[in-house]
Image (cartoon, rainbow, N blue to C red):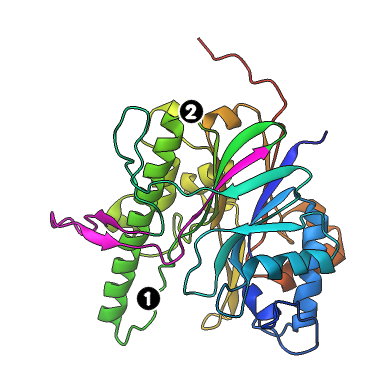
Amino acid sequence: MRPLRLATYNIEWFTQLFGNDNRLLTDREWSARYNVTRGDQADSLGIVFTAMDADGVMIIEGPNQGHRRDTVLALQNFARYYQLRTSRAIMGFANDSHQEIAFLYDPDRIQARHDPRGGGERDASGARARAPRFDTSFYFDIDVDAVPELIRFSKPPLELAVEADGQALRLIGVHAKSKAPHGANSPEEEMRIAIDNRRKQLAECVWLRRRVDEHLDAGDSVMVMGDFNDGPGLDDYEALFGHSGIEIVLGQNCAPEMKLHDPNADLALVRKPAITPTSARFWLDDQKRYFEAMLDYIMISPDLAVRKPAWRIWHPLNDPGCLKVPELRDALLAASDHFPVSIDIDLNRPSPPPSL
């Protein structure tokens, strides 16, 4: 059996490719992506998903869940249209942004269920969970005034209990708050909003890290995957805080057995632009050029890292396998402003003995 392949993929305006009947729109009307039709974007996504051939994909910015819209049904219709083996979908808590977090997977390889934690349950020692459930509230002092602020996720992370190849996994899908200073009417207001957004993003990452700590303390195998909208060099306010949300979730200051691992994050944190990987590509209209950033990660617990998995960023211009296939290269550019990140891991591979 081949290694398990899991991926995370932020699909820009995926929800606009579905009608109110949850069926895929493959016509020549414009999609919400610039200069791309709905049919071209949908077909491009079909090409990308087929080429990835993943056993499970954490979809960020999935189709909307609402009064007439059904995220799971829309994704399963998408999979059926393109004859993907990832034919089953699951989601967690809906949000108000029309950007749901969902998981599309192959039921012949993976069993998955929504399993949120932190609802006041007690751990084995009888202590209450350190992190509240992600659809509730979290109090954290984000401005160092000794008064905790109320934090809520605009997009609650998706917590899944997964079984694959006979092993139990905890998957957490994440779409952390964007730091863009929307609504600013002056440079001063732009700075204030940007700093407030950075603080909230860091608080969300602290909340998420506390959940990771609970799983690691319990001996769980954990993957945290998704779009963090964060990383070194993304704005001018990092120096105010001294670290990024990525570093918080990885647990850079923790003991080795409590650290998560992602080689793309490790390279990004080196802060040497020449070797920094990228997973997203945006057009800067004022500068008339593209800007690239590393935003999408798959972080794994130490027990999974010792199995020597392989990460891949499906970048159409930087990955040789994508670049040499024109159909796939063009599809990746048309499908979204983010590119998939995947991990191949052999869960049946014996773990090496612990070092002495």
Mark 1 crowdedness (10 Å alpha carbons): few <14, some 14-19, many ≥20: some
Please give the label number shown on residue 181.
Answer: 1
Judged by depth in the image, the label closer to the viewer, 1 or 2, is: 2
> What is the residue that sits farthest to the left in this orientation?
146
Region in magenta: 136-163
From the top left corner, tell me how far across and down residue 18 is, in percent: 70, 79
Circle 1 sits in a helix, a strand or a loop, which is it?
Answer: loop
The residue labelled by disc 2 is 219
Q: Residue 147 or 279: which is nearer the viewer?
A: 147
Q: Nearer the viewer, residue 91 or 252?
A: 91
Residue 282, picture quadrant: bottom right
Mark 2 crowd level (few <14, some 14–19, many ≥20, 10 Å Cα): few
- The answer to whether residue 267 is above or below residue 198 is above
Quadrant where the N terminus is found in the figure: top right
- Quarter-wise, where is residue 38 in the image? bottom right
Q: Earlier in the sequence, mark 1 or mark 2?
A: 1
